[in-house]
Amino acid sequence: MKQSQYFLKTSKTKPAEDVSINAVFLEQGGYVQKVMAGVYAYLPLGQRVLQKVEKIVREEMNTIGAGEIFLPSLHPKANWETTGRWGTLDILFKVKSQHSYEYALGPTHEELVTPMAQAVIQSYKDLPSAVYQIQTKFRDEARAKSGLLRGREFRMKDLYSFHASSQDLAKYYETVVVPAYLKIFERLGLKAIYTEASGGSFSKFSHEFQVEIESGEDTIYICDKCKMAKNKEVFSEDVECTNCGKTSWRQTMASEVGNIFKLETKFSESFNLQFTDQDGSKKPVIMGCYGIGTSRAMGVIVEKFHDEKGIIWPESVAPFRIHLLSLRGAEKEAEDLYESLLNSGIEVLYDDRDISAGAKFADSDLIGIPYRVIVSPKTIEQESVEIKKRSEQGSKLVKIDEILNSLQ
Ligand code: ATP
Ligand code: MG
C-alpha cells in the first residue's frame, strides 16, 4: 500500500475529551475516528487490525467445530418480551419505527439464537452443537469512555452451545471453550487471567478473561499462591481461595476481554426449546454462551503495547508487517524494494510521500508497524537498507538481496 494514496492522515493534536491511551494513539495514528461518544469509525488501518483480531477469533472458533452464523441487529420486540428483558435490561436500545412497530438493537443474541435453534435441534442426536458470530453490538451504556474499551456500538464474538445435560455443558465449558479462549488471547499477545465472577442474571458464577491494565474498569484479586483470580463483585478479602485454601490476594485493575456463562435452561425454557431424549421424554435444551469483545481487545492491546511515541503492535494483529520508508534521493530503490516485497506476499505500507525524514519517522513510531525498513542514499551506497524493530532501540544494516531472508 502506498501511503501517498492511502486513506490515512495522522494528527499531532490529541483528542480533546478522551485521555485514554488507546483513544489517543488510535485517533492520532489514523486508525479510528470518533463519531460521537462511544461510537467509532474504523479507517483502513483500524479496519485491518480489527479484521486480524477477528480472524484469530474466527480460526479458533472454527477449530472447535462451531458453525459461523450471522444474525440480524434489528430484533423483534416480542422476543425480548418473551424473556422479560424488554423491561429489565437497562442498556437495551429500543427503536420506534415510523409504522408504530418497536424493535431492539441487539446487545447480545440469546433472544434470536434460541428460537432459531428450534428448527435444527429436536433430538438428542442433534446435540451437542454450537454456533457463533462476529458482529456489531449496541448497548445504551450510561458512560461510554476509554476509547474502544467501552462503546455504545462495538464488536463482539458470541458463541452459543447446546447440550443434552448440564454435565455435557460443564465439560464443553471447561475442556473446549476455556482452552480455545486462552489460545485466542495468547495469539493476540494478551495474558488473559481466568477470573471467577458473578453470573449476572443467568447463574451463580461466570468466568471472565481479564487483562491487567491500569485503565481497566474492573478490580480483580489474584491469589498469591495459585494465581486463581476473582472479580471484586463476588469477593471479600478474608475469603479462602477455593483452589488452594490460602487467603493472600493481590489487588489489580483489569479489563474484561471475554466472559463465559452457563445459561442452563434460562433461555430454552422461555422459548420452549426442547429435545427428545433417548428414553423418548421431552427436555429443555441446556445452553451456554460465550463472548469476546473484539474491539475492546484491540483497545486493550494498545493499552498494553505502546511507548511515549505511539503504538507497538504485536505481529499477529499489526496492520502491516513492514513500514517501508524512502528518504529523499533513494525513491527509485525504495520503489523497487516495495515491488519485490509485494511480490513475496509481504504486507507492506510504503511511505513514498515527499516529506522530511523526521516526519516519516514520527508517523512510523505513532502507527507502530513491527518492522521499519529505511532506504536512503546512505544505505544504498552500501547496497543495504536499515531495518529497525518498533519494539527495540537499535537498528541494523541488511544487504538488499538478503532482506527477504532476514525478514522471514
Ligand atoms: P462490562 O462488565 O464491561 O460492561 P459485560 O459483562 O456487560 O461487560 P458481556 O455481556 O459479558 O459484557 O459481553 C461480552 C464481552 O463484550 C465483554 O467481555 C467485553 O469484552 C465486551 N463488551 C461488553 N460491553 C462492551 C462495551 N460497551 N464496549 C466494548 N466492549 C464491550
Ligand atoms: Mg461480562
Image (cartoon, helix red, strand yellow):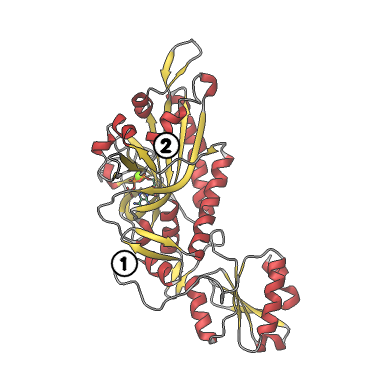
| Label pair 2/1, CB-CB below 8 angstroms | no
Q: Which of marks 2 and 1 is nearer the N terminus?
A: 1
Determine if residue 258 is in view. yes
Viewer-closest of 279 and 205: 279
Amino acid type of disc 1? Asp
Q: Name the residue under label 2.
A: 289
> Where is residue 392, by image quadrant?
bottom right
Residue 395 position within the rendered picture, expressed as x and y whole percent measured from the top left: 60, 78
- Which mark identifies residue 18? 1
How far is disc 2 from disc 1 in space, using C-alphas?
Answer: 32 Å
Viewer-closest of 6 and 191: 6
Count of numbered marks? 2
State the SS at label 1. Answer: loop
The furthest residue to the right:
401
The furthest residue to the front:
99
The furthest residue to the top:
279
Residue 297 position within the rendered picture, expressed as x and y whole percent measured from the top left: 44, 55
Cβ at disc 2 under 8 Å from ligand 1: no
- Crowdedness near tag 1: few (<14), some (14–19) or many (≥20) residues, C-alpha within 10 Å: some
Residue 301 position within the rendered picture, expressed as x and y whole percent measured from the top left: 45, 60
Amino acid type of disc 2? Cys
Where is 345 relative to 199, above or below?
A: below
State the SS at label 2. Answer: strand
- Crowdedness near tag 2: few (<14), some (14–19) or many (≥20) residues, C-alpha within 10 Å: many
